[in-house]
Image (cartoon, rainbow, N blue to C red):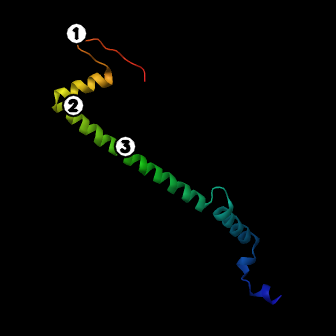
Amino acid sequence: MKLLSRIPAWLKNKYTITTIVFVVWLLFFDDQDIFTTWFRHKKELHKLEESRDYYLDQIKLTKSELDQLKSDKTTLEKYAREKYWMKKDNEDLFILPE
């Protein structure tokens, strides 16, 4: 009984005990606990940063390609023939399946 007399009165309150147990449950044992959520968000952030870097690189490549197409007529003609299968009026175009 000496041990129980050393515990403060506010810790003996059933509402306080219930609240503490509830908070501990939410922090550590629930499916949406702090640590699991934190790791999930960190993983998602890493994926998004990789995706951002990929698209920034793609934008740089596309801009350089656009600059080449604007500056050189032969590059523009080659691009039109390869990508859009364009041809001159006096040419025949044969498309072979890969």
User: How far, Cα to Cα, is label 2 from label 3?
Assistant: 21 Å
Q: Nearer the viewer, residue 20 or 26?
A: 26
* Residue 85 quadrant: top left
Q: Which of 13 and 20 is in front in this view?
A: 20
Residue lying farthest top? 90
53 displayed left or right of 32: left
| Among the two numbered marks 2 and 3 on one chain, the one whose residue lies closer to the N terminus | 3
Amino acid type, callout 3: Tyr
Instruction: Name the residue: 67% across, 67% down.
Output: 24
What residue is disc 2 on?
A: 69
User: How far, Cα to Cα, is label 1 from label 3?
Assistant: 40 Å
Rendered location of residue 33, percent (x, y): 62, 60
51 displayed left or right of 16: left
| Among the two numbered marks 1 and 3 on one chain, the one whose residue lies closer to the N terminus | 3
What residue is disc 1 on?
A: 90
Q: Which of 17 and 59 is in front in this view?
A: 59
What residue is disc 3 on?
A: 55
Instruction: Name the residue: 51% across, 54% down.
Output: 43
* Residue 74 quadrant: top left
**Contact (Cβ within 8 Å) of mark 1 with mark 3:** no
Element type at mark 3:
helix
Instruction: Name the residue: 55% across, 55% down.
Output: 40
Element type at mark 1:
loop
Amino acid type, callout 2: Leu
Quadrant containing the N terminus in the rendered view: bottom right
In the displayed structure, would residue 57 be above or below residue 9?
Answer: above
How packed mark 1 is, by other alpha carbons closer than 10 Å (few <14, some 14-19, many 20 or more), is few
Quadrant containing the C terminus in the rendered view: top left
User: How far, Cα to Cα, is label 1 from label 2?
Assistant: 24 Å
